[in-house]
Amino acid sequence: MELISDINIINNTSDNQSVIPDTISVNSPVSKKKLYIESYGCQMNFSDSEIVSSIMQKQGFGSAATAEDADVIFINTCSIRDKAEQTVRKRLSQFNSLKEKKPEITIGVLGCMAERLKTKLLEEEKIVDLVAGPDAYRDIPNLLLEVEEGQKAVNTFLSREETYADISPVRLNSNGVTAFISIMRGCDNMCSFCVVPFTRGRERSRDPNSIVNEARDLFEKGYREVTLLGQNVDSYKWSPDAELKGKAQIEKNGTDDFINFAQLLEMVARVDPLLRIRFSTSHPKDITDEVLHTMKRYDNICKYIHLPVQSGSSEVLERMNRTYSREWYLDKIAAIRNILGEACGISSDMITGFCGETEQDHHQTLSLMDRVKYDFSYMFYYSERPGTLAAKKFADDIDLSTKKRRLQEVIARQQQHSLERNQRDLNQVHKVLIEGYSKRSRDFLQGRTSANKVVVFPKKDHKKGTYVDVMVNDCTAATLLGETV
């Protein structure tokens, strides 16, 4: 799976598993029960938690600031690496004492880990009452009724139609400026290392009109940036009768019968010139020149692409079943640079220590990084996932110390490149959308450039949600520093 994220940082050896205690807000004073949600993993999980919160809100649930105050606790989980699952298990063990003091609390596990383990999760984690996969969120109210009747409740059915297009998400921990819009679900790519096709099912695209309407509604509510989310946004395809025909038939009928991602991107960009558009994630084999030219045509489509390479070795890429070679990937980078220019931000995912990776393979990854010079990357060592093609076909034959050493070398190279790329922005003026206060001081604000770089500058009288021009006069490997002009 490509990690869906727009966090402008260089990751260290820890997994890119964010966790934010998400809570919902309900205006009704008569709400009796309270919900507490924690979300782990990719941005799709955070988006899903907003859908779950909307469903629960309609059931009359209010918000709980802490797990101790909640009647229902949900953990929306990631299964991309073993460490991600162990983090969830540790969190569940922390809830064990809470359950002992307050046995009436319902604890549910949602998302990819729920889908992968299914009923095993109930057996392994005795305090779990409810398990719901990514396509079963509409059924949560019924599952809660089963729990109230003293049963353990499970729904991990994977749908070929569910997109939650008709559900208006509750924006959790929102800054009121940026928001996510899910445009499709599932993944048809069978990368050998990835569990996502088994936990999120097949690809299905959401009605573009519902996407545009959601973007327009967000803009009218004051939001100024939306990120279109999908496991592989470039494979977005929608037809008015998609549910009847099925995706294979749509593809056979040709472009006149469906809307592709480039067309959707244009539709959303035309909502308003002041609404910035981002998207994630792109698969190198699917991003097209049509998408790149659409990005170039609209100033409000951000000039930033997350294009995971995973490895710089064609041999490793073949074992990963990525369906492209090193040379093919570099040609795609060249197309991005030719159409969108050197200023376009490019980030990546990289895995070290995949099955059979030699030192030569590792150095090919480093040399590819030297060629591309990513603005930032999400970097991890390989973690075998049960049920994947790699687990069935290849030996996990790289020892942990070698994996970690190679990862540290990749991280060091990326830090060097991130600093170099940021230094290119010195003494230049950049248009920045203000997202809020700097993390370090309320005397400073921060926002991002079109290329997805964080910029910090003095607050003065500037307001969140507005655009400002910032002259960049200093930088670190992760942040640009400047003054408004």
Image (cartoon, rainbow, N blue to C red):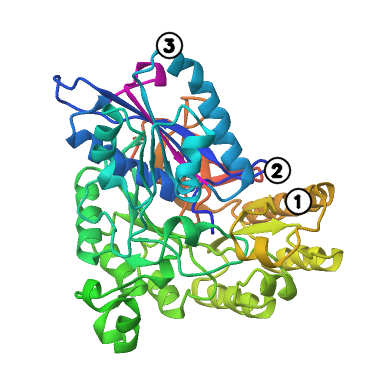
Amino acid found under the numbered disc labelled 2: Thr
**Secondary structure of residue under mark 1:** helix
Query: Gap in Å between the C-alphas at discs 3 and 2?
Result: 36 Å
Q: Are marks 2 and 1 in contact (CB under 8 Å)?
A: yes
Residues packed near mark 3 inside 10 Å, few (<14), some (14 to 19) or many (20 plus): few
Q: Look at discs 3 and 1 and give the one toward the viewer.
A: 3
Give the residue at mark 2.
13
Amino acid found under the numbered disc labelled 3: Lys
Q: Residue 347: name its quadrant.
A: bottom right
Q: Tag 1 or tag 2, which sits nearer the N-term?
A: 2
| Position of residue 407 in the picture relative to residue 162 (left or right) | right
Say if the magenta span includes residue 72.
yes
Say if the magenta span includes residue 360.
no
In this view, which residue lies farthest toward the top? 101
Give the residue at mark 1.
407
Q: Which mark identifies residue 58?
A: none
Q: Tag 1 or tag 3, which sits nearer the N-term?
A: 3
The one of 485 and 467 positioned closer to us in this rendering: 467
Amino acid found under the numbered disc labelled 1: Leu
The residue at 30%/46% (across/down) is 137
**Secondary structure of residue under mark 2:** loop
Q: Tag 2 or tag 3, which sits nearer the N-term?
A: 2
Q: Is residue 352 visible?
A: yes
Magenta-tinted stretch: 63-78
The image shows residue 265 at horizontal and vertical percentages of 33, 67
Give the residue at mark 3.
101
Number of numbered callouts drawn: 3
The residue at 15%/19% (across/down) is 29
